[in-house]
Image: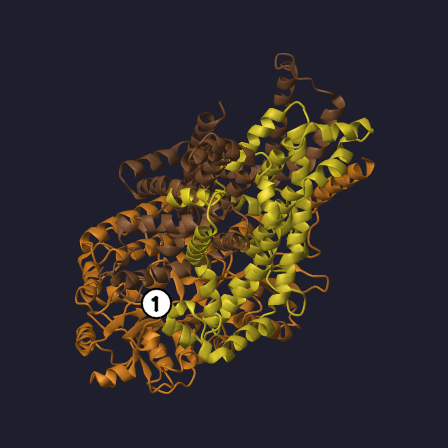
Chain colours: A orange, B brown, C yellow
Amino acid sequence: MKKALISIVSFLLMLTMLFGMIACGPTETEGEAGATDTEGNIIVKIMFHVDKSSTEGQAYQKRVNAFNAAYKDQKIKAQAIFKARSAGASGYETELQNNQTEGTLADIITFDAPNTAAYATSGLLYDISSLISADEQSKFYSLNKYNGKLYGIPIQESSAGFFYNKKIFRDAGINVDGITAENPWTLEDFKDVCAKLKAHGVTAVDMRIDATKDETAPYLLYPFIYANGGSFVSEDGYTANGYYNSANTAKGFQFIKDLISAGYTSYAIGSTDFFTGKVGMYLSSGWTIPDLDNKYREYFSSRDDWGLLPYPKGTEAASATGSWSYAITNNHHTDKTASLELLKWMTSAESSRAITDATGMIPARKDAVKDYAPGSPEYTLMKQLELSGTERPVTVAYPTFSTTFNQIIFGLDNGNVTDLLNSATKTLQDAIDKIKERG
Amino acid sequence: MTVTSIVIFLLFLFAFGGFVIYDLLTAKRHKEVYRVKSTVTAYLMLLPSVALAFLFILLPILYSLGYAFTDYYLLQPDKIGFVFLDNFAEIFEEISTKGMLYNAIINTLTFVVGVVPLQIGLALLLALFVNRPGIGSKIFKVCFFAPVVISLSVTAFLWEQILAPGPGGLLNSMLSVFGVAPHDWLRDPATAMPCIIVLSAWQGCGYQMLIFLSGLSNIRKDLYEAASLDGANAWHKFWNVTWVGLRSTFVYILITVFIGACRIMTQPMLMTGYMEHTVTLSYYMYNSGYTERLVGESSAVALLMTIFIGGITLMQRRLFREK
Amino acid sequence: MDTRTKELQNFRPNKTPAKKTVKEIIYHVVGIVISVIFVLPIVYMIATSTKSESAYAASVGTLNMFLPDFANLGVAFENYGNVLLNYDIWKYALNSCIYALIVIVLNILVNGLAGYVMAKLTFPGKKLLSFMIIFLIVVPVETSIIPLYSIVKIMLGLKQQMSVLGVILPATISIFNIFLFMQFFENIPKEYEEAARIDGASTLDVFFKVIMPLSKPIIATVAVFCFIGVWNDYLWPSMILPSADDGSWPLLPIQTALITIKSIESITTGEIMASLVITSIPIFVIYVAAQKYIVQGFGTSGLKM
């Protein structure tokens, strides 16, 4: 009895001790520019969305270490925090909002570009418009702006395009040599190629219209709406009505619907069909490049067997862009000078090159450009990004936009485009209004 | 939050104290005898579990149900304000205009009505099938349980391949032998929910099979012999001996499967995404709470759902209790 | 109904041996067919783990999905070798085992004690507690993960090492296990306890020396489900644990680590499946070993809700 009682009591003591941990603070002292350690260094915390053991995480850590070596004399010390987001966005965002309430928010965070509006309006991000010179700003392909204010600077860029099977194209007698990022094809050219492929007896193009469970379909397909002169929300991001259901937007979706009706693409294309030579073209992001280089040797033995075509051009030229970005946060450290130093370091040409070397993505800075041979897939993506890269709509209710976009694509073959757009517009407008009320 | 939690803790203690005093006062009427020593021992032994349950289960649930009356927006936790019944008004508006929530309710009901009998029936059949001696049945038992322990991402991917829409889909290519045209199982509103019902039942029934097996192992063998002597046929034996013996096991399984079915979320999430014809209540809550970040509204739905599930569960208990 | 009737007929003693053999064969054939339907994911997992990316891509949508790539068995060794050598899987698996072990011991102690008190002792406030047990089983917990996260963070403070407790402590309490223990203990005849009481044993002595030894089936059941729960959980640890530091031992459990591994760009589907096969083995071994006890654990004289 006694032994058991003692064990229970000690268990309870353990619990009380845990509660006591609240009282124990960190050994650092807080200052306006950041926490200061015992040696008088200002600590700047930076939180990354990837696992530290990943190649990308390693690249970040190396750049942070290099920063610490370079800024030793100025007594600034960067500390990297890694919070992998791979298990779902909720984990990373719950961490962010908790840190915000507890006052433990890192000085710099990384965030997904479509979240700019939501994070900015909720006061999570610090306005850096005046801190980054116009000259410096012009060096980036894209910037994370909301209502004219600058909130984030991209880490790296991505773009997408149409991977195509050169063997199939040769057999079908299709010549696409003249189509480059500088001189893109038109929507009509695109349909012609599809028609020829269909006549040749293969599925023309995998438009990924079945990838409506996550961000894949919105990310790959939104440029088609812009190419037709359509739009999704107003400039300030608060009005969907009149934009999302406008005639030009409908034209964009109708274009995709026509591809389905004509039998050029379908929901039934298997996820690996392009890689086994059953489909002529495959709409995908740059990360398919290493897959085609390494994983499918039986079907694509070298780059002579596949190529990459840019997005077709309509009344406008538009192509997909996407990035994770750095932002200085609105935390309790009011003096942002140390944070700014770290931000500049991490977005420098050197860092940009080092990180994209590890990830295979496109550098966010134009002056970090790598020497890709004109005509290579990487060159096409990069050039296309420079010439026609258009951001996804900036709105506080971006997640709702993404959901409604998926729903439209999902119902496109059986549904009427106007009806689908009207219902999506209503849903998005409701969500925007709700968040606006709370803002 | 620390202060609020302490306040809730004190309220909890206060309420608990009230109940204890009530129990003590009505002890005589209920013919209960409470002894000081055994009461103290009981509380000491309960302390670890009550402390842990309060911290990690009750407190989070109370918070999340409390959010139902606020405008909590995930990104602005510091600007949380009471809106009283506004969230519920919005819920009823969304239901009356046949919005997403209306679909979620219909789909959840469809799922529950479909999966509960199917899963329990399958589990019972499988249990009866393997309830015999021999190495064969032992191996079958392990096989039937397999989907319960396999990672959901594997089973979801497999089912996607089976139900793949093109002529290359496994089910479609098998059906094409009989001349059936390829069908888009998960996009067609008529077949999507039934497919999800079947795969959920398939995945879960191994667990209930085990519970049925344990129920079967408790039925005395001599009852069957007695029934045989009375000239009962197999059906009579099943109905009068097996079924009667399984009754309390059945009620337990019914309630747990029902509660689990009401919370269905992962399968539609992995198989179709957030679409009108497969959205369920839990998925709706997840989407509005995490994706759209409107925690207040999501909690209001959770509160209504709790009341609903709780009500039905109580009804089931009343209905099936041994009379 | 038909299979059931047939199946019950199997037990009839007055059958000719020949007829019996035929029935036996039919029984096993039917059993094998049903089993195949249930083990498909495992077959698929193992088959895929032996394939290169292009062999896998070619097999998708055909019955080859379920057949290993016999022509290139070297790929299978490569896949398993890569997974075991490059991604430190065994470290994460060991972590999961340690977490699971601690959780199992604490879970059985904490919930067993509670179950015992609820089943066997009378004290004021019991009715409220038994109502709470049912309430907490019924209430949906989808939205409570946000406040739970805040509570654990406040409790454990900022120290990263403490976050391990954040994984273990919430898992030590399970209302459902209290319920299972309660059901099981209620069916243990009073005589056992009374005999011990007469010898002067205290309540705790009775619990540890009389009740627990009689409760091996339910303890095994709870232990197995604790293990499966800890082993398969990925979302909560990914929220609460810091990701690996250079050199030091990682804290992540296996499933969370697997998600990170899966997101590595150069990894092939075959390697992902190989890692899933490896991580499924412990669960299977434990389940097969404890199966007999689980049936008994749910059993006694039936569960009452």
Q: Nearer the viewer, residue C2 or B252?
A: C2
As drawn, B47 above or below A359: above
Q: Position of residue C25 (x, y in %)?
A: 44, 56
Q: Secondary structure at mark 1?
A: loop
- Of A168 and B229, nearer the camera is B229
Q: Measured from the top left, where is residue C45 in percent x and y?
A: 47, 65
Q: Is residue B301 left or right of residue C130?
A: left
Q: So how many labels did they put on this image?
A: 1
- The residue beneath circle 1 is C61
Q: Nearer the viewer, residue B118 or B58?
A: B118
On the question of residue B306 being in view, the answer is: no
Relative to C119, residue C254 above or below? below
**Mark 1 is on which residue type?**
Gly
Residue A278: x and y in percent read 29, 75
Going 21% across and 64% down the picture, which residue do you hit? Answer: A260
Answer with left or right where residue A198 lies relative to residue B79. Answer: left
Q: Which quadrant is the N terminus of chain A positioned in?
A: top right
Classify residue C283 by image quadrant.
bottom right
Q: Is residue B4 above or below residue B165?
A: above
Tell me if residue C260 comes above or below residue B27 in the rendering.
below
